[in-house]
Image: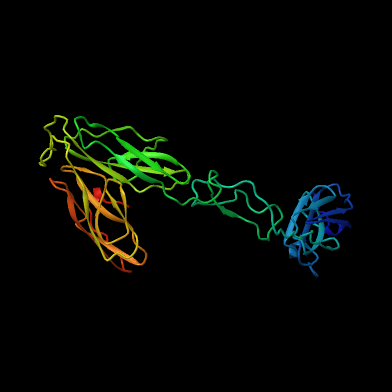
Amino acid sequence: MKKILFLSALFLMLGNVAFAAGSATLNWNANTESDLAGYKVYYGTASRGLITHPRNGGYTNNVSVTGTSKVISNLTEGKTYYFSVTAYDTSNNESAYSQEKTKFIPLSNTTTPTCTSWTYSAWSTCTNYQQTRTVVTSYPTGCTSGTPQLSRSCVPTSTGGSDITRPSISSFTIPSTASSYTVPISTFVATDNVGVTGYCISPVNSSLDCTWSSSPQTSYTFAADGKKYYLLYGFAKDAAGNLSYRAVDTVYIDAGSTTGGTTTPPPTTTTTTYTVGGTVSGLSGTLVLRSNKGEMLNVTSNGSFTFQTKFAKYAPYAVVVYTQPSGQTCRVAGAYGTIISTNVTNIQVTCTGTGTLLLHQLPQQLRTP
């Protein structure tokens, strides 16, 4: 059996230790033993002290190499490291530590520029003027402080500023009677301070399911469900996403169906129409009333009022306060009903000092925003 090499014969000298930021390069003299297998580089942030052999500890890290140099990387800046090297043979006999070398790993340049302002050109998508959008990218490279603009409001390019004005529907009418479920739109007129960009008609009093058109629709086809009376709503919007108040009109359809139907008597065969109005009391400013036909009526004095838009016989009517007078609250009594055979003159609008507005419980299909 081959005799194990005496460990003290594996003495080596550790040469210069060259350092770069975060790494160290070690070089040492080669051993001449015929059964030499390699070397081990030991290192750590604490000295081994009086410990002379690896079997007794001494360092927290070690790496095996076959040559006579080694680059140790990923060293922590600002720390002092201690290095020693051993040799080992093919039987895993290992020498004592070489002399210990030490080196401080210097800090790299950590100066961070202070960025007080900069300009971004990439912004998140702007869908309407109310949305606040942010920059797509974060702080520029190397900047960790400063006071840049990181968000801004969306502004429609067509106005040059924020647009919060709703479009206004001045006229929305359909025929009082029809013999087909496809009903023509008699008038659909809307205006806006910038421009109307969308029109919608719907059998329900919501714009959520609207199919928008860039021009007013000319007809609408109701579901052939055998009913007689139908409501149709009109909506308008602008480029900033502002939505108009809804307008509504009614039509009596007699398409010859006997299914479903209504117990309400059919419309008269004459062209007689009726007006809707009433009286105002306690008013000290300007009041705006609105009918379910979409007509706005400015009232500036107490007494009687009458909407100009006519209603057909058996048509539903409704009146609500659109704008309250300054410092007052006006309430409407007798606000809705059905035209029978006379003009409506009994709607009572009472105005009092500042208070809480109590909206009358109109039928859902007749309510206005």
Residue 12 in sight here? no
Relative to 183, does residue 166 appear above or below in the rendering?
Answer: below
The quadrant holding residue 145 is: bottom right
The quadrant holding residue 44 is: bottom right
How many marks the image carries: the answer is: 0
- Name the residue nearer the viewer: 355 or 275: 275
- Name the residue nearer the viewer: 157 or 75: 157
- Name the residue nearer the viewer: 49 or 207: 207
Instruction: Report the residue at 25% width, 49% height from top.
Output: 366
Is residue 140 found left or right of 162 in the rendered image? right
x, y percentage for residue 222? 25, 34
- Name the residue nearer the viewer: 51 or 231: 231
Instruction: Report the residue at 60% width, 50% height from top.
Output: 135
Residue 324 in sight here? yes
x, y percentage for residue 118? 69, 54
x, y percentage for residue 4? 80, 53
Instruction: Report the residue at 72% width, 62% height from top.
Output: 60
Coloration of the structure image: rainbow
Is residue 27 found left or right of 176 in the rendered image? right
The quadrant holding residue 263 is: top left
x, y percentage for residue 94? 79, 56
